[in-house]
Amino acid sequence: MPNTFIAEQPVVEGLSIPPHDYISMTYAGTGNAGADDPTTIVYKIGGSSGRTVATLTLTYAAAGRVSTITKS
C-alpha cells in the first residue's frame, strides 16, 4: 500500500512553494499581459483535482515584463 501521508509544512516567508505534483497556468492576454504571458499559476497536490497549495498572481508592466508577483 503506498504511503499517502503528507506532513504539514512549516510556514516559510516569501514565495516558497510547498510540495506539489500539478501546476496549471492561466493566460489572460489582457491589460499589459501579452497572450503568451501567464497571469495565474496554481500549484496543487493530488493531481489536477487535488488541493491547491499555492497560487501566484502575476501583473505586467508590458508584454513579457513582470511587474509584480503575489502569492496566496
Image (spheres, grey):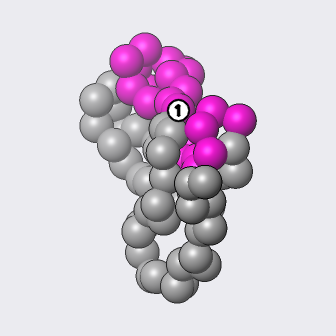
In which quadrant is the C terminus drawn?
bottom right
Residue 29 drawn in magenta: yes
* Quadrant in the picture for residue 35: top left
Span shown in magenta: 24-49
Q: Position of residue 13 (x, y in %)?
A: 45, 82
Q: Is residue 55 visible?
A: no
Q: Position of residue 51 (x, y in %)?
A: 70, 51
In which quadrant is the N terminus drawn?
bottom right
Amino acid on which disc 1 is placed: Ser
Q: Is residue 42 visible?
A: yes
User: Along the line of sight, which residue is nearer the eye, 1 or 30?
Assistant: 1
Q: Main secondary structure of the magenta part?
A: loop
Q: Which residue is mark 1?
A: 24
Q: Is residue 48 left or right of residue 16?
A: right
User: Along the line of sight, which residue is nearer the eye, 26 or 69?
Assistant: 26
Among all residues in the image, which is located at the extreme top?
Answer: 35
